[in-house]
Image (cartoon, rainbow, N blue to C red):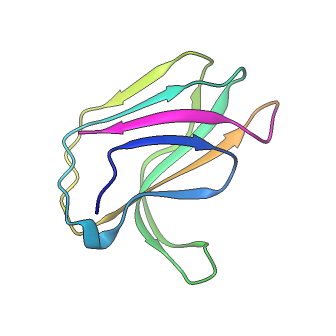
Amino acid sequence: MATFLHNISGELITELLSENDNVSVKSISIANTGSYKTYVDLYIGTISKDGSAATTHYVYKNYLLHTGENLTINRSIPGKRGLYIKLTGVVTTSPTVDVIIN
């Protein structure tokens, strides 16, 4: 079952929606809730068994999200696609963001 609210912390790849959720996305909001800037990779793709990205089609790559900044993406993403996020902290290895999917 699809989850539309996410609290994400750390520098791991996080699956926001799986390919099996079959959810069409209309917009995504990403808010930096941490104390430092963070780089955001948001992409459509698949994850291999070892947890690495197998295929990626980037919506954003290396987007620098400032402290307290909110990024709103008004793009439709068709269902039957996985949606993933990867954070890279600028000062810390524990960047945090909140993600809301509509």
The residue most toward the front is 1
Front residue of 79/20: it is: 20
Picture layout, residue 6 above or below residue 20? above
The residue under the point 79% across, 42% down is 93
Position of the N terminus, as image quadrant, is: bottom left
Q: In which quarter of the image is residue 6?
A: top left
x, y (%) of residue 32? 56, 26
Left or right, 44 with reference to 39: left
x, y (%) of residue 85? 51, 51
Front residue of 35/90: it is: 35
Position of the C terminus, as image quadrant, is: top left
Q: What stretch is highlighted in magenta?
A: 92-102
Left or right, 6 with reference to 14: left
**65 within the magenta span:** no
Front residue of 5/51: it is: 5
Left or right, 94 with reference to 54: right
The residue under the point 57% across, 84% down is 49
Q: Quadrant of residue 75?
A: top left
Picture layout, residue 93 above or below residue 34? below
The residue under the point 69% across, 43% down is 88
x, y (%) of residue 90? 76, 32
Q: In which quarter of the image is residue 39?
A: top right
